[in-house]
Image (cartoon, coloured by chain):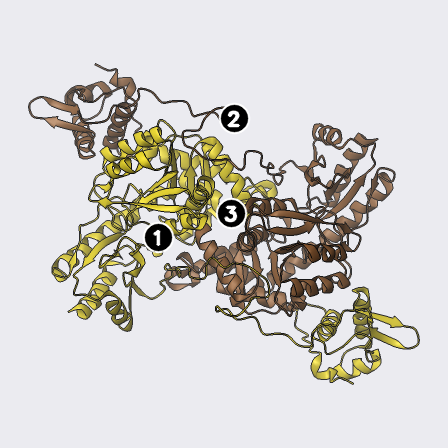
Chain colours: A yellow, B brown
C-alpha cells in the first residue's frame, strides 16, 4: 500500500473542509500518476486510521471522488480509480525554459521578449526620478472621506454595479467643468471617456487610429511609452526635429507633401523629455496642416496643471475648430500615480469607439474611485490640492535649479523649466552617466543612467532630473551626494 | 468697437484668476475669427470700464496675451492682434456627423461602428439580469477599514507610487494561497498577474496568443465578450458543440487532425451561457490534445467560487503538468463588478509578456485597492464574505427554481444549475421573447430579449435568468410580474 499517511496532508485550519482536502489529495495522486487507472483505494476504516480523521470524512471524500468521475465503487470489492481514465504522465515536468532555444508548451510569438524594463519603480528613499509627483502631498484622507460618504449615501450601491465603459458620469461632468474653466476646452460630457491614466488614452488612440504600416509623426526625442505603444500596433515612427520652440512644424509640412501621415503625437506643453513648449505660431500651423491633410493630432497634455510662471498656453484642443484633436490628460500625475485616472476627449464617434474597445480591455473603470474624484472636484478639494502642490513644486524647482547653477556649473547645462516636474540636464561629455548612476546607487541615491532617453536618432549625454518628489532637505542631500560623486 | 461687454464673460467664482479669464476670452475671440490679425484692442482703461473690472487686471491680461504670442504692443499706439498670425476660419464648425456618409475631420477606420451595446448596465430596481452578484452583500465597510489601515500604516505612502505591472505583491501572494487552498492550483506569485476583472485576462491572452487569421476554438454558444475580444484581434472562431457534458472534445480532436488551432477557450465550470460543467474525462483529454498539438488552453474559471452542492471539479490548471493552461479568474464577480480585480496565471515568459503589454495599456492596477483586497484575504474576511454570499445565493437559486418549476411548467424548460448565478432557460417556442421583454419593462421589470446569446450557429428561444442579485422578496415579485405577462 502507498504511504498515505505522508501523501495525504490535512490542514485543520485551511478554509476547505476536511473531506474536500482528502478528495483533492487523492486527485493529485491520480493526476501525478502515483495512483493509476484500476488501482484499488484503501478501505475507509483503514485510511481513516492512517491519517487520523473520522471514517465518515473518508466516506464523504470517496463519494465526492466518484461524483467527480475519478473513481468508481464496485460492490463488495471497494473503491477503484476509474479504469477508463487516460494514463497521465508520471511526474510533474519542470516549466519549459524562459530563454531562447527552449520550447514553450504551446506555440506563440513573444513580441515582448526585449521589452524596455519598467522604469517607474523607484522606491529608494532618495531618488532623482523621471519627474514624478510627491505622493506624500496627496490628500488621501480626503479621498477616504469621499469613499465613506459614497458608500453610506447611495441606496442600492449602484456604484458597485457594472457601469458604462466611458466611466462615471459624475467625474466626466467634473472634468468638463475643470477643463472649461482652466483651459478653454469646451466639450459635452458625452465626448469624454475616463481612462486609467494618460497611458490608456495613448493606447486607445493608437489602437483606433493606426494600422500596421501606418505612419505616426513623433518628436525626435519622445515619450518612450508612447513610442512603444505606437510600435506595438506595428506603426512606423517618423521623427520630427524638436528645437527651443517645440516640434518643427515646417519640417512636418515638407514631409506631408510627399508622405501620408495618419497621426501626429505631440506634447505641446513641456515636451518629453526636453521640457520645451511648442510656440503658438507652430500650434496654429499644425492645426491648419491637420485640416488640410486630414490627420489626427494626439495631444498629450499630461503636464498642463504644472506651470509655475505665466499661465500655460491653451491647448490645441481649445482652438481646434475642425475637430482634428484627440486630447489626453491625466489626474494620476497630479494626485498619485497608483490611482489611475485620466481622460480622453475627441469627436463623438471616436470616443464611442474608444468605449467599445475599452469594454474588451477591462469593461470599465473603478466607479468608486471615479465618483470619489468627482466629489473632490465638486467641493473644490482637488483644485486646492493642485494649488498647494504647485506651490511646493515651484519652491523645489527653484532650489533644485539654484543648486545646479552653483554646484554643477561646468558639468550640467540646462534651462530652468517653466513647468513640469523635471529639468532636462545636458551633462558634460566627460561625465560617464552609467558610471555616475552606479556610484550614486552605492551612496544611497537612485539616478538614471541616461540610456532611457536614447533612440535610433537621438543620443545626447543627457537625462531628466525630477525635482518634485523630493522635499527641500532631500534635494540638498541628493544633489550633495551627486556633487561628491562627480567631483 | 466690438461688444466686449457681452463677448468677455467674467465669473468671479471660477477657479481661474480674473486676468487669465480676460486673456482666454480674447484668445477665443482671435481663434474664432471675431478679432483678426492686426486688429487693435481697446485701451485698458476703456475695456476695464466696459466689463467692470480693475484696469490693472486688463493690463495683466494684455501682458499675458503678448507673452503667449497672440498680440503685440506697438509703442504709443496700443495693443494689436499679431499681424503674422495665420487667418483662422471665422466660426466654429459643427462636429462632423456620426453616421455613415459624412466625413470625419481625420481619416480612420471605425472597427466598432456596429459594436454590441453594453449589456451590463441594469439599474432598474427589479432586473432578471445575466447572472450578476448582489452588490448589497459586498462588505464595503470592511474594504473601507482596510483602506484606512493602509493609508495610515505605510510610511512614505509607497502604495501611491508607480508599482509593477504585475500588480501588488501582497495580493498576488494572497491569491496564490487562496488558489492552492481551494482548488489545487499551485504556482509561485511571480507567475501571477493581477488584472482588471477576468475580461482583462481574456484581452491580454488573446493579444499575446493570436494573430489575424489564427484560429481559436470556442463553444458553439460562448461568452460573448470573449468572442468579441478574439474577433477584435482578427482571429477566426471555430465553434465546437457543447452538450450536457460540456465541450465536445472528440469533435475538437477531429478538427485538430486537419486544422491548426492556436488556442482553445473554455469555461469548464458553468459554461456560458448554458451553465453545463465539462466532465473530468473530457478535461483530461483536452489536456492530452493540448500537449500533442501544442495549443494553449485559455481556462476562464470566473465562476469557480459559486458552487452549491458538491465541491466543484478542480480546474484544468491544477492538473496541467505540461503547462498548456492559461488560467483566468475574477474577484469582481464575487465582490463587486465595479471593483475590477481578476488574475491570470501562466508560464513565466507568458506572464512577463502580459505585464509588458499591460504597461502599454494602463501601466498598472490600482495598488490601494489591490493591497486592501490582499488584507481582506489575509484576515479571512474575503472568504467569510464568499461563504456568506454563497449561502444567500443557494437559497435564492432554490426559490427561483421552485417558482420556475411550479409557475412556468409549460413555458420554461431548465436544469437547476449546480453553481453560478443564472439559470439557462429554454422558452416555449410560442413565447415571443422580445415582446415579453418589452411588456416586462412596462411593468417595471428588466428582462433580456434573448438576442444577446445568439450567434451565426446558435439561435435557441432561450436566455440566462440571473437569480443572485435579487433577494427572496424581489424574486417572488419579479417572477410574479413575468408570470402575469406570459399568461
The location of residue B235, given as percent across then percent down, is 59, 47
- The label nearer to you, 1 versus 3, is 1
Q: Dot 1: what SS?
A: helix
Residue at (72, 69) in percent of width and height: A17
Q: Dot 2: what SS?
A: loop
Q: Are marks 2 and 3 in contact (CB under 8 Å)?
A: no
Q: Dot 3: what SS?
A: loop
Relative to A453, say whether B6 is above or below.
Answer: above
| Residue B99 image label | 2
Residue sticking out furthest to the right = A76
Distance from disc 2 to disc 3, alpha carbons, whole Å, reads 31 Å
Q: Quadrant of residue B329?
A: bottom right
Q: Chain of mark 2?
A: B
- The N terminus of chain B, quarter of image: top left
The location of residue A107, given as percent across then percent down, is 57, 61
In primary-sequence order, the first of circles 1 and 3 is 1
Relative to B188, say whether A214 is above or below.
Answer: above
| Residue A224 image label | 1
Relative to B223, say whether A260 is above or below.
Answer: above
Please tell me if label 1 and label 3 are on a single chain: yes
Distance from disc 1 to disc 3, alpha carbons, whole Å, reads 27 Å
Where is mark 3, residue-wise? A366
Distance from disc 2 to disc 1, alpha carbons, whole Å, reads 36 Å
Please tell me if label 2 and label 3 are on a single chain: no
| Residue B200 image label | none
Amino acid at each position: 500500500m502507498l504511504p498515505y499517511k505522508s501523501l495525504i496532508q490535512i490542514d485543520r485550519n485551511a478554509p476547505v473542509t476536511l473531506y474536500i482536502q482528502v478528495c483533492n489529495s487523492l486527485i493529485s495522486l491520480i493526476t501525478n500518476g502515483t495512483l493509476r487507472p484500476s488501482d484499488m483505494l484503501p478501505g475507509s476504516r483503514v485510511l481513516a486510521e492512517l491519517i487520523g480523521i473520522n471514517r465518515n470524512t473518508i466516506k464523504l471524500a470517496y463519494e465526492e471522488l466518484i461524483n467527480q468521475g475519478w473513481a468508481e465503487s464496485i460492490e463488495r470489492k471497494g473503491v477503484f480509480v476509474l479504469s477508463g481514465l487516460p494514463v497521465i504522465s508520471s511526474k510533474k515536468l519542470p516549466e519549459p525554459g524562459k530563454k531562447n532555444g527552449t520550447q514553450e508548451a504551446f506555440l506563440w510569438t513573444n513580441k515582448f521578449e526585449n521589452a524596455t524594463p519598467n522604469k517607474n519603480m523607484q522606491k529608494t528613499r532618495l531618488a532623482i526620478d523621471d519627474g514624478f509627483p510627491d505622493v506624500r502631498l496627496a490628500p488621501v484622507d480626503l479621498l477616504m472621506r469621499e469613499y465613506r460618504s459614497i458608500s453610506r449615501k447611495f441606496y442600492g450601491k449602484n456604484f458597485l454595479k457594472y457601469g458604462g465603459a466611458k466611466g462615471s458620469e459624475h467625474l466626466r461632468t467634473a472634468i468638463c467643468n475643470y477643463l472649461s474653466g482652466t483651459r478653454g476646452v469646451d466639450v459635452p460630457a458625452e465626448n469624454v471617456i475616463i481612462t486609467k491614466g494618460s497611458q490608456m488614452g495613448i493606447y486607445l488612440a493608437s489602437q483606433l487610429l493606426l494600422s500596421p504600416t501606418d505612419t505616426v509623426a513623433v518628436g525626435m526625442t519622445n515619450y518612450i511609452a508612447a513610442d512603444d505603444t505606437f510600435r506595438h500596433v506595428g506603426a512606423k515612427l517618423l521623427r520630427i526635429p524638436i528645437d527651443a520652440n517645440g516640434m518643427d512644424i515646417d519640417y512636418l509640412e515638407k514631409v506631408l507633401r510627399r508622405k501620408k501621415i495618419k497621426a501626429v503625437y505631440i506634447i505641446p506643453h513641456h515636451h518629453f523629455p526636453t521640457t520645451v513648449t511648442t510656440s503658438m505660431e507652430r500650434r496654429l500651423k499644425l492645426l491648419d496642416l491637420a485640416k488640410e491633410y486630414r490627420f489626427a493630432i494626439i495631444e498629450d497634455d499630461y503636464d498642463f496643471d504644472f506651470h509655475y510662471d505665466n499661465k500655460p498656453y491653451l491647448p490645441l484642443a481649445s482652438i481646434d475648430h475642425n475637430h482634428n484633436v484627440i486630447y489626453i490628460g491625466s489626474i494620476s500625475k497630479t494626485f498619485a500615480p497608483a490611482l489611475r485616472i485620466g481622460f480622453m476627449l475627441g469627436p463623438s464617434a471616436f470616443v464611442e469607439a474608444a468605449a467599445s474597445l475599452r469594454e474588451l480591455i477591462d469593461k470599465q473603470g473603478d466607479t468608486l474611485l471615479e465618483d470619489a474624484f468627482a466629489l473632490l472636484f465638486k467641493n473644490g478639494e482637488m483644485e486646492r490640492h493642485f494649488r498647494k502642490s504647485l506651490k511646493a513644486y515651484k519652491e523645489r524647482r527653484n532650489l533644485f535649479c539654484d543648486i545646479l547653477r552653483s554646484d554643477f556649473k561646468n558639468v550640467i547645462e540646462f534651462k530652468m523649466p517653466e513647468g513640469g516636474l523635471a529639468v532636462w540636464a545636458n551633462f558634460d561629455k566627460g561625465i560617464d552617466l552609467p558610471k555616475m548612476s552606479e556610484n550614486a546607487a552605492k551612496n544611497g541615491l537612485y539616478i538614471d543612467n541616461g540610456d532611457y532617453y536614447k533612440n535610433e536618432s537621438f543620443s545626447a549625454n543627457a537625462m531628466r532630473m525630477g525635482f518634485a518628489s523630493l522635499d527641500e532637505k532631500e534635494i540638498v542631500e541628493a544633489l550633495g551626494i551627486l556633487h561628491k560623486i562627480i567631483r
